[in-house]
Amino acid sequence: MSGWIPKIHRPIIDKLLKWGIIHLLILKIISDEGETWKNQIEKLLYERYGLSVGSGSLQSRMFLQQKLGYIEKVREEWGIMGSKKRKIYRVTPKGLDLLKSSIEFLEYVLRRLREPPLKRNIK
């Protein structure tokens, strides 16, 4: 399988398979918003992509992204009317690089999927 994948994309496909698309969507939302918090990401995942992701699942994915250096906590601020603090995140340069490379890889795959099938001479 990996023979047709350009060398530059091999690490990206590994990340896509391991992380799943949801991690890329989280990075995309945070990147688009500049800075945002978990509940806002949860809301935008549904509004933009029709995905319902549980709060605990989203939190664990964001924790992993933070641990790996793809997002960082910028600050904490109080929610509306003194509700509990919310953590505000942004995408790091490392996260932006992963997002850009992943988008390029997905575009490459889509181009390949749209190509007509190869004709093979089978004897």
Image (cartoon, helix red, strand yellow):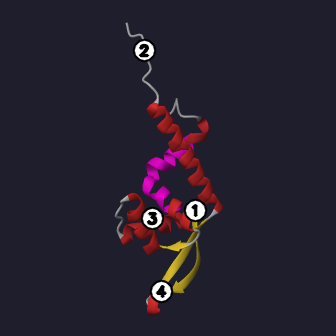
Relative placement, left or right, of 8 versus 117 is right
Q: Which amino acid type is marked by label 2? A: Arg
Q: Position of residue 103 (x, y in %)?
A: 54, 48
**Mark 2 neighbour density, 10 Å: few (under 14) some (14–19) many (20 or more):** few
Q: Earlier in the sequence, mark 2 or mark 3?
A: 3
Residue in the image at 42% along x and 61% along y: 48
Pointer 1 local density, CA inside 10 Å: few below 14, some 14–19, many at least 20: many
Q: Position of residue 11 (x, y in %)?
A: 56, 45
Q: Which amino acid lies under the numbered mark 1 shown in the image of this protein?
A: Tyr
Q: Nearer the viewer, mark 2 or mark 3?
A: 2
From the image, tell me which residue sits under label 4: 79
The crowding category of the residue bearing disc 4, from other C-alpha atoms within 10 Å (few below 14, some 14 to 19, many at least 20), is: few
The residues bearing labels 4 and 3 have C-alpha atoms spaced at a distance of 22 Å
Residue drawn at x 57%, y 62% is 70
Q: Nearer the viewer, residue 80 or 100?
A: 80
Residue 44 location in percent, x, y?
A: 43, 66
Residue pictured at 50% horizontal, 35% vertical = 111
The answer for how far apart the CA atoms under marks 1 and 3 are is 11 Å
What is the CA distance from the residue labelled 2 to the residue labelled 3? 43 Å
Magenta residues (range): 10-27
Contact between labelled residues 2 and 1, with CB atoms less than 8 Å apart:
no
Judged by depth in the image, the label closer to the viewer, 1 or 2, is 2
Is 4 situated left or right of 43 in this image? right
| Image position, residue 100 (x, y; %) | 59, 51
Residue bearing the label numbered 3: 61
**Distance (Cα) linking label 2 and label 4:** 62 Å
Q: Main secondary structure of the magenta part?
A: helix
Q: Using the rendered image of the protein, determine whether residue 1 is visible from the camera's viewpoint.
A: no
